[in-house]
Amino acid sequence: MKRTRLRAPAEGSQSLKSKHIALLTLLPFLVALAVYANTAHHAFVFDDFEIILDNPLIGNFDRLSKFALFLQEPWRSVTQLSYAMTRYFFGFDPKFYHGLNILVHGLNSVLVYFIALVLAKRWLPAGRHCHFALAASLIFAVHPLHSEAVAYIWGGSSSLCAFFYFSTILLVLIGQTSNGRRRHIWQLLALLSGVLAWRAKEEAITLPIVISGLFVLTGSWRIAAGMLVIPALLVASKWADLGRLYTRTMENQALVAAGLERTLPPDVYFLTHLKESVFYYLCRFVFPLDLNAEPQVEPVKHLLDPLLVLSVLILGGLVLWGVSTARKNPIVSFAILTLLMSPLISYAVMPLADVVAEHRVYIAGLGFSLLTAWFLTRKLRFTFVTLSAISLVMGVLTIERNKIWKNSLTLWKDVVAKSPRLARPHVNLAVAYEAHGRPDAALAEYRQALSINPRLSPAYVNMGAIYLLRNELTDCENALRKAAELSPSLPAPYIHLAILSTRKNSPHEALDFVDKAISLGDSFVARLTRGDVLYQMGRYDEALHEYDRAARLGPNLPEVRAKIDARLKRLGKGGPIR
């Protein structure tokens, strides 16, 4: 009787299964890259200028031996180091920073796939494992609410934190199913990843709480209780730094001095954040429309505010659902935990100037993706069609949303259209118009901003700069003196008044103005201006000294170096160089 050999077909079947899993793993990565490919050639926008381009720590990172400097940074050292390393190898070409953000988001989508797969193997029927993991990872990869964390370079601080955050969760899950020495290795890697998440962004303080909830759902109560000690230890070890950060953030001195409103009081901020967690974040997770880089937020001024009451009921209902279904559907409980933990706990207790910022809920997207995948895979017969349709619609919405982040002009036009009653977007749009050579449009936006908030001194300063370029010296002086009157503690009006005085051939008056500016805050621009004033006075040695100070204060950028070199060349023709 002829016998049939089964080994070869079994191996082939196993190989086919492995290839199938590998393809499923690669799919969310490729989809994430495809959806965000149109951001690769976007420009720097918004806080990118101050935090990356004008940051001396990043700009002066010219050798790898300076690596240790970032270890001394109390906040976001890993994030700043990532920008510094990008600058070291590729300069300040924005496409490399955007490329890093896209790559990190693609990797995060893969991490979501594996987290979902491990959870599904533990808590879901066998037939749903791959469907659940694929659904969660694709929803995460294409969700439009993540656009700010990927298309906006500085928003990538949240996606980079998420990379280590998600890695920690995955390593803990793998460690739970390992034994002996391997378990200790996975636990050590999880600890390292958790530290890097914390050093990337402070919202990782919620990570031990999420891990603790995971241990509770798996019956490891003692370990869960121990995990809750970690946030307490972090707060205790960083108490002084946290206190200074809290005070500085709440006082918001720089923006208040510029004429913007004070940060909301802690109690009002907390209640407002609860409301917006539902009516902005959760609503846009479900219906990702009307996204806005700076939405108009109405503060909650009393506990009986109807929207606040409704928000508390909704949040309470989600918590109740998570607790009540922990035995029957622990995967739902974990999804709700990760959905609510990051946006509520991390940002509800630290009053910030902006109550809402979409990139802050990037990590919460893990919870939403898991919860959505659970719903989608309950009836496997419709999963593929439904998931394809949702992914397609969300992908198109994300591609369109990414276009808003192309440059400062497209960004602030969108914000002004959606938040016309906010003054700051009008100022930022005016600055963008200036950069695009449209001074008349810029002046119109500055006037619009001042009609909303007449105390905005930066608007007067920038208007003065436009008038100076047009040689409209009377209008220039009036605008700058108004700015100095409104914000006597800011150096910018005095620097511009010094430049105006040199134009009027009044160097002694200019020197008084620039010295006043330096007394309020030393800077590259102030020292460069002082050098110009001293040059006009014929004090060449002193001018050379000021240019040297300017070079040391300014970031190591080609345009900064070019300004210094131009002065030195002029000084070489007009006087001695020592």
Image: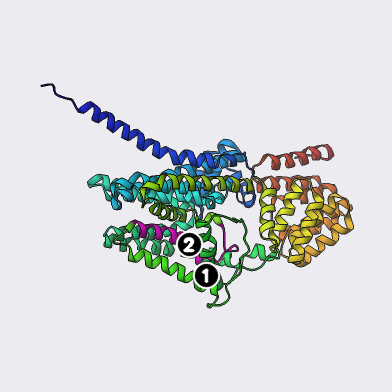
Residue that badge 2 annotates: 346
Check if residue 105 falls in the magenta segment. no
Residue that badge 1 annotates: 270
Q: Is residue 549 left or right of residue 68?
A: right
**Label 1 – label 2 distance at C-alpha:** 11 Å
Element class at badge 1:
helix
Q: State whether residue 69 is above or below residue 569.
A: below
Local crowd size for mark 2, using a 10 Å CA cut-off: few (<14), some (14–19), many (≥20): some
Quadrant assignment for the N terminus: top left
Seen at 85% across and 48% down, the residue is 536
Residue 315, percent from left and from top: 45, 67
Q: Is residue 515 left or right of residue 342?
A: right
Mark 2 belongs to which amino acid? Ser
Q: Name the image quarter holding residue 497.
A: bottom right
Residue 201 visible in the shown view: yes
Quadrant assignment for the C terminus: top right
Check if residue 354 falls in the magenta segment. yes
Q: Nearer the viewer, residue 262 or 566?
A: 262
Mark 1 belongs to which amino acid? Phe
State the extent of the magenta-drawn residues as a range. Answer: 331-357
Residue 24, percent from left and from top: 39, 39
Residue 291, percent from left and from top: 59, 55
